[in-house]
Amino acid sequence: MTASAASLLPIGVFDSGVGGLTVLRALRAALPAEDFLYLGDTARLPYGTKSASTVSRYALQAADRLAGRGIKCLVVACNTASSVAIPALAASLAPVPVIGVIEPGAQAAARATRTGRVAVIATEGTVRGGAYPQALAAIDSRIEVAQKACPLFVALAEEGWTDGPIVEAVARRYLEPLFIGPRPADTLLLGCTHFPALVTPIRRVVGEGVVLVDSAETTAAATAARLGGLGLCRGQGIGTVRLMATDGPERFARVGSVFSGEPIAPGDVELVDL
Ligand code: DGL
């Protein structure tokens, strides 16, 4: 296929659920002329508590489904899948480029920190694999990283509980220990695409002095740069979004509306089986 024909294909985006819609939102802002095909693997969420081999297998199946529809690029809008499956996905989809969220998130945190101390919150799988400490060390080996797995944040976000006393109590339990001590981090990296939905209680717990970063905007910028370099950007027009989920289109629409910042009707979500 020629680059100009490929440039008309949509960008595939995938996550375990609705969390990746925070990345989709940034992608649409950065690349308004592009069409997007989003897949949330809601039937098998959460990914964050599963083994690396299971997450890789699920990610390959989701990518295969998107590739079967014809995509010009895959954005893995899930930190857990990005932390374990990028090499396998890139090999499986080649020559279609695959972009994960870990490197862009690490770049954003490295740019934000003034003290060189970064705290990372993510799923158990992302924390266990050490992808963020590795990515940050590759950018600047002097950066000190403290990590904390916050699996309940995924369940709260998927439930649509984005603020209130229960969410704040959970946030305090997870986050306060990270910021106690003589050398606390000045930057908190939200290393899970579900976590930006909880930014209000997180901000309340960590205070105004801590910079909060996530990978949405930097991933969108990395995607735009990669497509531009390959001559695959769509020049003009207003792009479309097609949404797919592996379970519960109604639930996806309801909770996804919060994540994407605009209403989603259940009829807009296609149910697919992987
Ligand atoms: N949103 C995903 C991430 O960025 C994972 C959530 C989950 O399925 O556990 O890691």
Image (cartoon, rainbow, N blue to C red):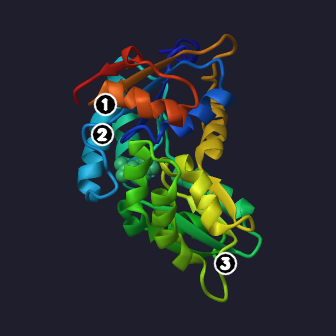
Residue at horizontal 23 percent and vertical 30 percent from the top: 274
Label 1 within 8 A of ligand 1 by Cβ: no
Tell me the distance, in whole angstroms, between the alpha carbons under discs 2 and 1.
Answer: 6 Å
Along the line of sight, the residue nearer the viewer: 227 or 106:
106
Identified by mark 2, the residue type is Leu
Examine the image and state in which quarter residue 181 appears: bottom right
**Is disc 2 in contact with disc 1, using a CB cutoff of under 8 Å?**
yes
Q: Amino acid at mark 3?
A: Arg
Q: Is mark 3 within 8 Å of ligand 1?
A: no
Describe the element under mark 2 as helix, strand or loop: helix
**Secondary structure category for the residue under label 1:** helix
Q: Earlier in the sequence, mark 3 or mark 1?
A: 1
- Which label number is shown at residue 64? 1
**Numbered mark located on residue 60 in the image:** 2
Q: Give the mark count.
A: 3
Q: Position of residue 88 (x, y in %)?
A: 34, 46
Q: Earlier in the sequence, mark 3 or mark 2?
A: 2
Question: In the image, residue 214 lies at what x, y percent?
Answer: 60, 52
Label 1 environment density (alpha carbons within 10 Å; few <14, some 14–19, many ≥20) = some
Q: Is residue 138 above or below residue 267?
A: below
Residue 50 visible? The answer is yes
Residue ID for mark 3: 142
Q: Label 3 crowding class (10 Å Cα cut-off): few <14, some 14-19, many 20+? A: few
Which residue is at the front of the view, 166 or 15?
Answer: 166
Q: Secondary structure at mark 3?
A: loop
Residue 267 in the image: above or below residue 36: above
Say the numbered circle drawn on residue 136: none
Tell me the residue at 32%/36% (across/down).
41
Q: Is residue 167 above or below residue 87?
A: below
- Splitting the image into 4 quarters, where does residue 95 fall? top left
CB at disc 2 and ligand 1 closer than 8 Å: no
